[in-house]
Amino acid sequence: MIKSLVPSIPIQAILGILVAVVLVHSDLAHARVIHKERSLYRNIIVDKTKNMLCLTFSVKRKEHNQSCMDLRDPDRLVFAYVRMVFAALLVNPAPQKILIIGLGGGSIPTSLNKLYPKASIDISEIDAAIFRVARDFFGFSPNEQMKVSISDARVFVKRALLRKQQYDLVILDAFTGDYIPEHLMTREFLSEINQLLSSTGVLAANTFSTSRLYHHESVTYQQVFGEFFNFRMAGTSNRVIVTGKANGDKYRLPLRSTLMERAELLTEPLKKLGIEIRDYPLYMSREIDWDPNVKPLTDQYSPANLLRD
Amino acid sequence: MIPVSVSWLPSCTLITKTIESMPKTDKHTLIKYVILLLAFISGFAIMTIELLGGRILAPWFGSSIYVWGSIITVFMLSLSVGYLLGGRWSLNNPNLFRHGFFFLLASITLLPVILFGDSVMESVFVVITDPRYGSLLVSAILFFVPTAILGMIAPYSIRLLVENQQHSGKMAGLLFFVSTLGSALGTLVTSFYLVLIFEINQVLLTVSVVLIISGIVAMLVFQFQASTAND
């Protein structure tokens, strides 16, 4: 039955439709896909326009660029939220030991490696395919100072605690896909990170600013760290949480005047990366603008993906 | 085995009287429905525990595909052992009292997951550095026994339902239908709603309580079955 139907559709018609689809599609996207793979965790697409090389996880291109590189100026950080992570340097301007959770295209570790050539940088990335893509397409190259561990961040952090490791700067950048790793949003995980922080350590987390999750997440950070800088800027729906080690006694984040002094000193070195650090202190708010009565996210209760609508 | 006396419960007396006043064929149908309901509950419980298992292991071993691989492997393995043992034990004087006992046992063996889950995971995490084998061992320690016991319920139920060879396949089919439907619903309800409303331990504790109630119901029905059999 089915077999007899097939020859009745002219092969030319099928080809015609295919060609049309391909043409229209490539025209809309304006980008040439130079690499495509399905890893254990996601679709990975690398596409290239005239001046831009982008890493995307979604099939719907242009919607979820994870990381882009300006081919005319590879040092410049293209995305606002990536630049915003560097606000952590206002709290600790000289980190010697750095942990980055989530590699992406590798622009954050590469930039930090250039800024602080002597600092050791550990990177925990769950997806080996992401590491290969960062290395093969985005010029990310691990070295003596910069090491990548292919592991789940929760496992990496727990192992680092067993080794009694301490970090001056932890960057949590694991929440940019369509799926949120729920065990990386809980109070328990954040207190593990807090234990990893040295006495002058700082955490920068690239997280969410919309949906019900915003309230739950803010309450969770507040419970672990007390105060934190809620850092939002125009042009991105991400927010970056910047906070320092909580020691049981009251943690005091630096005053705005201190942030501004440090921003002055960092202005020159960060300029090459396209970071206007001088503007940042104005947007780093300590105001509580979330509902403080929602449940914190814990290992027992963490429906982060369901709270996202 | 002599069933515990439960006549002090007024509601039980009520059930006894209701059942006693029923015609014999109705009594028979009632027992059949009770067995099917219990099978539904055990199917539901298995998948609720399995899904929460992923959540329980995530803080120590991540939520990668191998963690799910470990959990599913252990659940399949323990169910297969449970089917074998449940079937074998159904040869020896099968009755609803023993059937209910499986539920009580499953409920009790589930409690260590709540009580000692974290300390078990911590010890394994320290000893085994590869999260694949760590998660496999932890899944086995925490989930093998309760899941195997829940697996015994299906073949045992079939034995209780089957009265003659001709309809044995039909009864087995009916039982698989009901218990797998329970599993499907358990998966859906847990992942869509329960994790949004409750904490993991609250859900596990509820499952444990529901299993105890199920066991008691089975034992009660056995008692009435026995008390009315002499009429």
Image (cartoon, coloured by chain):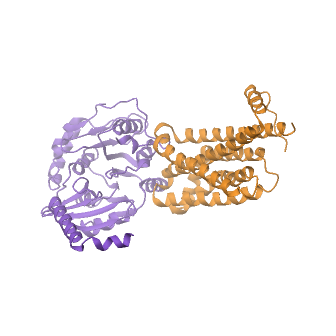
Which chain wears purple?
A
What residue sits 32% from the left and 68% below the top?
A132
User: Which quadrant: the N terminus of chain A?
Assistant: bottom left
What residue sits 17% from the left and 47% below the top?
A265
Query: Total of numbered circles in the picture?
Result: 0
User: Is residue B112 among the parts visible in the rendering?
Assistant: no
Q: Is residue A257 above or below residue A52?
A: above
Q: Is residue B61 above or below residue B24?
A: below
Image position, residue B109 (x, y; %) = 67, 47
User: Is residue A124 among the parts visible in the rendering?
Assistant: yes
Which chain wears orange?
B
**For residue B158, side relative to residue B68 (left or right):** right
Camera-nearest residue between B33 and A186: B33
Camera-nearest residue between B20 and A179: B20
Outermost top residue: B10
**For residue B70, side relative to residue B217 (left or right):** left
**For residue A304, side relative to residue A75 (left or right):** right
Image position, residue B196 (x, y; %) = 46, 39
Image position, residue A142 (x, y; %) = 31, 66
Among the 4 quarters of the image, the one containing residue A90: top left
Camera-nearest residue between B12 and B230: B230
Image position, residue B44 (x, y; %) = 58, 46
What residue sits 24% from the left and 72% below the top?
A10
User: Which quadrant: the C terminus of chain A?
Assistant: top left
